[in-house]
Image (cartoon, rainbow, N blue to C red):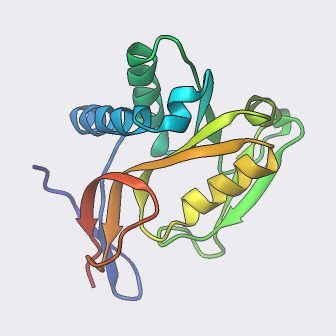
Amino acid sequence: MRDLPVYEVGGGLKIAYLDSFCDFELVKALSQDMAEAIAENHRFQSAERVVILTAVSKGVPFAYTVANALSQACADKRIEIAVARKENKKFYGKVVTVGKTSITSAEGGDLLVLAENEVKKLHGANVVLLDDMYSTGASLKALEELANTCGATVIDSVVAVWETGDESLTPPVKYMAKLPLIK
């Protein structure tokens, strides 16, 4: 059980903030569950090489921990990570970009950028989309667009936590825990 701080994100909507950078025990536990969920996917089971695609920044601790768990549990597979950044750098080479707006985005939205080396890594790869939170689905949709643009095949989508204001809905991704959106 965790006491999470609650922050308003606009329009009277509040979210509980899960800090994946500072809670190693929680990241480790959720990542183990995520790895097990991914390993059950028959498309993962038949793949020799899988790239976990996540976005900076809070998805990164989960991506590394999930990749480690999958590498240990599935020694016959080559598990790699690709990270979409939020800004372009001169040394990224030829990039692929996509814009997104989520409930935590600054005004004007966010930009996700894949550096040239990440684009090459994704080309022809089997990809698992991974993120820390699922609220509106905007981040995973942007990651999926990046993967498709790079010629990858998305074989699974998994998040650590689903934030919802409507308990009757089911997100189109695997999630390990649930947090309420507070109105």
**Callout count:** 0
Q: Position of residue 105 (x, y in %)?
A: 54, 68
Vertical position of residue 102 compared to residue 1: above or below: below
Vertical position of residue 180 compared to residue 151: above or below: below
Whether residue 71 is visible here, answered yes or no, is yes
Q: Residue furthest bottom?
A: 11
Tell me what residue is drawn at x 56 percent, y 66 percent: 138
Tell me what residue is drawn at x 28 percent, y 79 percent: 168
Q: Nearer the viewer, residue 50 or 89?
A: 50
Tell me what residue is drawn at x 52 percent, y 12 percent: 76
Vertical position of residue 119 compared to residue 158: above or below: above
Q: Position of residue 60 (x, y in %)?
A: 49, 37
Position of 88 with respect to 134 (left or right) is right
Quarter of the image for residue 56 reads top right
Q: Residue furthest top?
A: 75
Quarter of the image for residue 10 reads bottom left
Quarter of the image for residue 34 reads top left
Q: Position of residue 69 (x, y in %)?
A: 38, 22
